[in-house]
Structure formats: C-alpha cells, structure tokens
C-alpha cells in the first residue's frame, strides 16, 4: 500500500491508509498533536465525543482539494492523500478548543486542591493551555455525591467529563461490565444504578484511563500529592498481566501502583488488580530504576527527572 | 433506589408476546426487543421499572442488567421510580405553550394538589410535564397511557379528572393488548 | 385545488382498513412496480421525481438510495423514520393514523427497489396507538399477499415490522434511530461511515421519513415526470405542512411547493389568518430547529420578493434574513407572544433531548436554557444576551450530530431578529408580556 501524505500545521508526514489525523500527528509529535480527552488508542470505538481535538481540514485531499465544511474530530477522521490539516495554525480550531474547554469546565467543581488527580489531570493541562482566565457562568453546577464503586475505586461524578473510556475498559478488558452511562443529556452519569461493586481482575484500569479525577484509587486517597512522590519502573512475575508497572514512592513508602503510560497519557499495557492494589510492599517488586518524566510535568517539580 | 422484594415473572401469554417480538429481529439480535419489552415490563409493574424488573428483562433477553439500566434511564417514557395509578403527562413545548399549556399544568396542579413530578397522597395520580407529543395542531395536549387528549381547556380537564376519579383510572396497561 | 398526493382520500371513513384503501386504488402502484419495473428502474424513477427527504434535511431521496452498498453480501435494510418529535411537526402522526396502508405500500416499494428483505417502521413510543393501527394494517397486507413470501407471485419477499421508541427526540437522527432499534441508548453514531454502508446491525441501510415513503405509490402510479412537474425549482412535488400556533385553522395541509407564504397564512383554504384578527409577529417555518423570522421577513424576502413555501425561497437570505423549510412544522406567533419565553421552551426541549454524548451539546444546551431562564425571570444582564449568542456559535457545527445546530439556530436567530425584546426583559427586570 502506498503511503498517504498529510500536512498538519505545515509539517508533512507520510502515514499508512486508515490512519487518523490524530495518529498521524502523534507520529510527528510535539505541538501539532491535538489534545485527546476521550480518544484512547487502545480502546476500540473510543473518541469523537469530547470534541477537544477538533481541527480544520483546509484541503480534503489531492483529488478533492475542497476544505471540509466543519471542523472535524481528528481522532476519528481518516487521513486522505494530500490532506492539509490546521490544528494550532487555525484560529477557528483554537477558538473552538477554548469553547470546548469552557464547556467541560462549567460543571466541573474545580476542586483540584483536594483532588488526587491534580498534577496528572488532562483537564488541568487542557485548561492551562486553552482555558479562559475567568468564568463566564453564574449558574449552579451539577452536584453528585462521591461514591465507592467497589472497595478500591472512588467515583467523583462531579469531575467526570463523560469520555466513556471507563465503560469501554469494562466492556473490552474485564469479563463483565456492571457500570455504564445512565441518564441522558446533562443528567448523564457514570453509575451502576443500584449500588453494585465493580469487582473484577482488571477493573483498576478504569482509574488509569480516566482523564480526570472522576475515578481514583481508594488505596492512594489523600496519601500524597503526586508531585511529592517519585515514580519507579518495576515489575514482578504475574500470572494475570505483564506485571510491568510504575511504583509511586514517598521516601521508602510505596503509595501507589499504576500502569506505565506513554507521553499521551495512555497505558502501554493494562495491569491487573493484584499488581495494582495488593502488592504495596517494595519487596514484592523488582525495581528497574527511576522513571523518566517529561520535564514540563508537574510531577518533575520536586525531583530530578533526567530524560 | 427501591427494590421489589419478589422476583417478577410474566405469565405465559406475556411471555408468548415477547417471544413473538424477539422473532422480528435477526438471530442473536434479541437485544433489539429491549424497548418493546420494557414497555410491557413497565405496564406489568404498576407503571415503573424497578431494578428487579429490569434484571428480569435482562435475563429474558440474555443481556447484562447494566445494558437494561442504561437504556431504561435514557428514554423519557420509562419511570425508574414508582408512579401513581394514572400518570398524566402534559406537553409544555413551544406550540402547546403558545396555546396555554401553562394554564393546563396550573389547573392540574391545583386540582390534584401536587406539582409536576409528584404523586397524590392516595397514589391515584402522578403529574408529569413532557416535551413535544407531535400533536401541536390540537394544542394543548396531554397523554395518559396510550391515549391522547387534545385541544384542552380547564373545563375539559375538570371533566377528564372527574371521569378518571369515578372509573379509578389506571394508565399503565400492556400497550400491545 | 392543489394536487393531493398524500392526503388524497384521507377523510374517507375507514381508510385505514385494507378494503377501503384497496377500493380507492391502493396497492395498484405495488402491482405495477412488481410487474413492470426492475428495482433499478424504480430507483431511477425516484431519482427523476426529484423527491427530497421530508424529515427535515431535504436530501434527494433517489441519491440517498444510490449510496447503498450493493457490493456488500450482507442483508440490506430499509427503516422508516416515524420518530416524529420536532416541535411543530405532526404530519406523520396524521398520515400514519389515517392512511397506514399508504405508508406500508410505500415501504414495500422502497424495499423492492433497494433489495430489502426485512424492513422496520421505527415509531416514537408516545404514538403507540398509531403503531397498533399500523400493525393491524400490516397484518391485513400479509393476509392479502402484499407482504410475506413471494408477493403477488413476483418472487419478491418482504417482512415488515413496527418498532416503538420510548421517548427520545434524538432518535429522529438516523444513526441514533438505528442504535435505538438495536436496543441501545439513542446516541448518534460518529459518521462516516454512513448507514448506506454501515447501518442497522452493521449492514447497508436506508432510513427515510414517513412522508417521503408515502409519496412513492403516487410517483409509481403517475410517473416521475408528473411528480417533478409539481412544485418549483429544486422543490418538486407536494409537502405536508403542519400548521399550529396563533392561526384560525391549525392542521395538516398538503401544499404544492412554491405556494406563497402569505397565501398559506391568510387564505381560508389553509391557516385562515391570525386568531382574533391579531397581528402576525413571527413564524418558525420548518419545525423548532429552524431560524425564527419576523413577520416582514417571512412574508417577503430581504429583496422584497414574495416568500414562497419551497426549500430555496425559505432559505433565501441564508441565516441573516432567511430560514429553512425543514420538516414543515409551521409555528405561527401573534403580537401577544413573548419571543424570549417561546425560545425558553425550545431551549428546555433541546436540553431535555440532548443525548449527552458530546460536550458542546450536553453542556451548551443546558447553559443556554439556564441563561434564558434568568432573562425571562428578570435576572438577566445585557452581557447574558451576547453570551447566549457566543455559546450558540460554539455549539453550532461542533457536535457529533445536528442536534447541536438545532439547539443553536433558534437562539441565534431569535436574538438576531428580536434583540430589543431580550434587552427589554433585562431593562425591566421582568417579562414585559
């Protein structure tokens, strides 16, 4: 198959047929990559919902050079040969991204100071780049009570942006889904309807795929701000998963175990709940060494972070 | 969320009807029958879908209970909380509003002593406001069970209420029968 | 008198019964098609007739049929969109209730043209009583050999079923409808792929509105040329207009496309003028989603030409001074109407009906409703008016499906044409009506 040529923010890249604009941009990396709040390459059918990755297609293809009439979701739009895409170079796309960020925030509690996700929250990152400096709403926010879904996972529905990733994890990674999106429109929520425990060997991955602090690890709750912990790559022999994880240490204490994420915040591999929740002694792990963290990350603020 | 204590079970006539409905869809696509079956289940369960009833529907269609909850909570015709014997649904969208729907709602409120979303203390009536019922030419319109009542006035509302009280109106009946 | 294609005989008592429909010439189009037309010839007839989707989008029906994937080995489906829920629109309700066999005959014709073996009519759950009328008519059609195996000895077989919705406007969006028909939440799918390639159960599917389907028997009986001879420009044939609001004669009218709007509103043959001799203030001409127009712009275009009931004339002037024919839901407002309050009911409707899947629609519809509630309630500020325009602008075009546009246009147009009324609410700190 011949490669398709696509230009994104004046950077040319050749990709295989069937590649989305988002993934073409990721092949290049850097600022031309649109943010993804709902898309997750390892979850089938994800994307298209949050609309933060909208870009302008200035030229549809070499064959049909007309621009596309509307902004398109880069995570769900396939590259055509000769396509010209404008992400950060399109004022229209940037204006929409600012609006989408505002939409995602109008019902968000902005409780970052007490949120365990702070410091590794994609909504924080998004707001930092695309958010308005002041709120334009005076309206009351939607309010839900935090609940435990299973003994290890806390659901803060107030923070949820309805990306559907955790639903897809339950559908695609675990053997039975007991939670889902209930209700409709602005009353939609993640729920089990009647209180049921999400209890499954792989359910903990819902925490890792959550772009915000809606699903957090109950065993790590309020233990530490993430930037006071140091991440180490580690592994163990596990019969259920690869056993390759990140250990989040504070001094000698192992506070949290997560999967390993790439620079787009996606897990390299899904890990099992045994590794995540039940091995909180460093002796259980073979530590490979400190994990490289991107220098701009808030997590690197209090320690090294050689890349 | 309230739980029904006993596990529901449909009679053979209803089960036959459901079997017939499932046959309308291709093999393995029995989930397609979910909306029709939930209409029947709601009617058989005093007008609302209890978790127990939804779990039963899930077992009939061989799907997970969460798939039923997701769907039942999406569609506005399904009640996830108990309702009165007679559910009165008043349309309030633009065309009905232009023709005085607010007066109709207010009249129901004062006659029944309840607000939309509430049920009378005797459990006889539930008042709901709903969105467009596609009968705008004969606004204002209400729906009770499968019946439409159109071109309403406060006098007509009085007549209907008197009649429903007299006959002990029940709005939830299996709509297929 | 205008040609009656859809409402012909609608007042004949018992038309919903097979015998009555048959005696009035029903199912002759089907007989003709099965005997004299190949499926491709029938598709060509539909293309040549120029009939366009009557659900609101106005997409040419023949072209839509042409997109169906004929290479696919999978079964194909035809689904009738009877999820009529657009405020102001009640034409399909009427047609299905009083002339169910016309819809059924149309479904058989469409299915034959598309090579469909199983077809569905998806009808909104609130219209369960109409579904029972359709179900009975379908049974009659089976009993008389017009449905089932080997229809009229032609070798063509078709099964037709009704499927009820359960209260969700969004299921009128064709991919949400297909999701719903599969027993799921009515979340619109991300397109492409379009249903013609990946539709019901992943199979090639065409979704057509009731009124579109119901026009097929006449087109077959009278020929595509006869159909295309009615109407004006690219607006061929007749259209059902459901008229409501402050008019003397609300109801469903079949018009030849091209009828002057003024005649439609004031003539006794149609709406019969404004109630109590009141003054016309505004019209929403094509269902709640389309831009509202003030009296002067609905009767005449900005250029001073008489405005006609056609796709092109109603759209003349774009969104600055024009609107859309949409679904034909014609909502008339007299001078006593508060535009802000009317808009608030629409905003509430769209917030209530948003599926919640994508952020601009989920958050934007609810935000706009809340601001309008404040303005109508006397707590609005001048800034709120501009904020509404700004939110509408950012919802429009940025959503998965057209519900975002449908929610944004009424807001944008009401403020464009009636800004002073919003400002008056703010100045008086109450509703002036």
Image (cartoon, coloured by chain):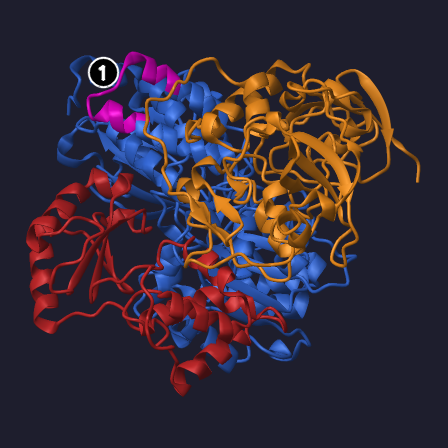
Chain colours: A orange, B red, C blue
Q: Using the image, determine if residue B161 lies above or below residue C304.
A: below
Q: Nearer the viewer, residue C157 or B82?
A: B82
- Taking C287 as reference, is C426 left or right? left
Quadrant of the rendered structure where residue C386 is? top left
Residue ID at (71%, 48%): A270
Please tell me whether mark 1 sits on a helix, a strand or a loop.
Answer: helix
Which image quarter is the C terminus of chain C in?
A: top left
Q: Residue furthest bottom?
A: B12
Tell me residue B31's x, y (percent).
54, 67
- Taking C8 as reference, is C393 left or right? right
Q: Which residues are magenta?
A: C371-387
Residue ID at (13%, 71%): B168
Q: Using the image, determine if residue B50 lies above or below residue C371.
A: below
Residue ID at (51%, 36%): A161
Q: Using the image, determine if residue C392 lies above or below residue C41.
A: above
The residue where tag 1 is placed is C426
Instruction: Please indicate, yes or no, whether residue A172 appears anywhere in the rendered image.
Output: yes
Quadrant of the rendered structure where residue A296 is? top right
How dense is the environment of label 1, judged by Cα within 10 Å: few (below 14), some, or many (20 and up)? many
Q: Is residue C300 magenta?
A: no
Tell me residue A66's x, y (percent).
72, 24
Residue ID at (23%, 51%): B117
Q: Write down the chain letter for disc 1.
A: C
Tell me residue C275's x, y (percent).
17, 36
Name the main secondary structure of what is drawn in magenta. Answer: helix
Instruction: Please indicate, yes or no, whether residue C8 appears anywhere in the rendered image.
Output: no
């Amino acid at each position: 198959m011949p490669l398709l040529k696509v230009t994104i923010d004046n950077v040319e890249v050749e990709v295989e047929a069937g590649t989305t604009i988002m993934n073409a941009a990721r092949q290049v990396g850097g600022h031309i990559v649109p943010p993804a709040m709902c898309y997750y390459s390892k979850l089938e059918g994800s994307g298209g919902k949050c609309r933060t990755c909208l870009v302008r297609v200035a030229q549809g293809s070499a064959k049909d050079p007309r621009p596309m009439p509307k902004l398109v979701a880069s995570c769900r739009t396939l590259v055509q040969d000769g396509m010209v895409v404008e992400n950060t170079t399109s004022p229209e796309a940037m204006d929409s991204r600012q609006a989408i960020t505002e939409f995602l925030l109008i019902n968000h509690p902005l409780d970052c100071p007490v949120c365990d996700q702070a410091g590794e929250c994609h909504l924080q990152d998004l707001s930092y780049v695309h958010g308005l400096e002041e709120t334009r709403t005076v309206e009351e926010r939607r309010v839900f009570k935090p609940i435990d879904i299973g003994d290890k996972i806390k659901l803060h529905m107030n923070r949820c942006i309805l990306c559907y990733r955790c639903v897809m994890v339950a559908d695609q990674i675990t053997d039975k889904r007991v939670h889902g999106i209930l209700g409709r429109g602005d009353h939609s929520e993640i729920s089990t309807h009647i209180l049921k425990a999400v209890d499954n060997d792989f359910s903990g991955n819902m925490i890792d795929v959550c772009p915000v602090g809606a699903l957090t690890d109950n065993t790590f709750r309020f233990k530490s701000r993430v930037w006071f912990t140091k991440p180490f790559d580690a592994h163990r022999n596990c019969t259920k998963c690869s056993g390759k994880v990140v250990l989040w240490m504070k001094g000698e204490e192992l506070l949290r175990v997560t999967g390993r994420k790439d620079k787009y915040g996606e897990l390299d591999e899904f890990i099992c709940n045994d590794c995540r929740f039940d091995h909180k002694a460093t002796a259980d792990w073979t530590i490979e060494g400190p994990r490289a963290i991107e220098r701009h990350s808030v997590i690197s603020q209090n320690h090294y972070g050689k890349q | 969320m309230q739980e029904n204590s006993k596990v529901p079970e449909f009679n053979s006539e209803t089960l036959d009807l459901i079997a017939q409905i499932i046959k309308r869809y291709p093999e393995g696509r029995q989930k397609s029958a979910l909306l029709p079956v939930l209409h029947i289940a709601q009617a058989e369960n005093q007008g609302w879908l209890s978790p127990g009833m939804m779990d039963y529907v899930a077992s009939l269609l061989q799907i997970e209970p969460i798939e039923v909850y997701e769907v039942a909570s999406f569609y506005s015709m399904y009640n996830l909380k108990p309702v009165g014997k007679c559910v009165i649904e008043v349309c309030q969208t633009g065309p009905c509003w232009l023709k005085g729907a607010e007066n109709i709602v207010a009249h129901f409120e004062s006659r029944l002593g309840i607000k939309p979303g509430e049920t009378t203390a005797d459990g006889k009536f539930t008042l709901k406001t709903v969105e467009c019922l596609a009968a705008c030419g004969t606004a204002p319109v209400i729906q009770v069970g499968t019946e439409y009542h159109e071109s309403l006035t406060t006098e007509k509302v009085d007549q209907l209420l008197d009649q429903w009280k007299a006959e002990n109106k029940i709005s939830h009946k299996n709509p297929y029968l | 008198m205008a040609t009656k294609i859809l409402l012909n005989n609608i007042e004949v008592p018992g038309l919903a019964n097979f015998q009555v429909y048959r005696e009035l010439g029903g199912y002759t189009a089907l007989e003709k098609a099965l005997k004299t037309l190949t499926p491709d010839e029938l598709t060509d007839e539909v293309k040549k007739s120029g009939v366009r989707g009557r659900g609101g989008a106005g997409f040419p029906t023949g072209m839509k049929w042409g997109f169906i994937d004929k290479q696919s080995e999978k079964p194909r489906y035809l689904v009738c969109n009877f999820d009529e829920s657009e405020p102001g629109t009640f034409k399909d309700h009427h047609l299905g209730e009083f002339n169910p066999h016309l819809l059924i005959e149309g479904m058989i014709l469409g299915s034959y043209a598309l090579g469909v073996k199983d077809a569905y009519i998806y009808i909104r759950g609130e219209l369960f009583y109409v579904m029972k009328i359709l179900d009975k008519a379908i049974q009659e059609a089976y009993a008389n050999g017009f449905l089932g195996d080997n229809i009229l000895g032609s070798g063509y077989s078709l099964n037709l079923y009704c499927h009820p919705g359960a209260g969700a406007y969004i299921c009128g969006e064709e991919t949400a409808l297909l999701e719903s028909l599969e027993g799921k939440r009515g979340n619109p799918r991300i397109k492409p792929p379009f249903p013609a390639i990946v539709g019901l159960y992943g199979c090639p599917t065409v979704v057509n509105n009731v009124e579109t389907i119901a026009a097929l028997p006449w087109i077959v009986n009278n020929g595509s040329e006869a159909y295309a001879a009615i109407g004006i420009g690219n607006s061929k044939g007749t259209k059902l207009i459901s008229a409501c609001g402050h008019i003397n004669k609300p109801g469903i009218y079949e018009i030849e496309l091209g009828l002057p709007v003024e005649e439609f509103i004031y003539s006794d043959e149609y709406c019969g003028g404004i109630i109590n001799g009141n003054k016309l203030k505004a019209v929403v001409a094509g269902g709640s989603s389309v831009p509202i127009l003030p009296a002067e712009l609905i009767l005449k275009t900005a250029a001073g030409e008489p405005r006609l009931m056609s796709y092109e004339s109603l759209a003349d002037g774009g969104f600055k001074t024009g609107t859309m024919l949409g679904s034909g839901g014609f909502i008339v407002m007299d001078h006593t109407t508060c535009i802000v309050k009317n808009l608030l009911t629409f905003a509430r409707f769209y917030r209530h009906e948003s599926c919640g899947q994508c952020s601009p629609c989920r958050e934007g519809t609810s935000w706009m409703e809340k601001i309008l509630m404040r303005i109508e309630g006397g707590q609005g500020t001048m800034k709120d008016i501009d904020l509404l325009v700004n939110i509408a602008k950012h919802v429009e075009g940025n959503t998965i499906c057209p519900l975002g546009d449908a929610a944004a246009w009424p807001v944008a147009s009401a403020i464009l044409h009636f800004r002073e009324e919003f400002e008056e609410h703010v100045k008086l700190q109450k509703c002036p009506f």
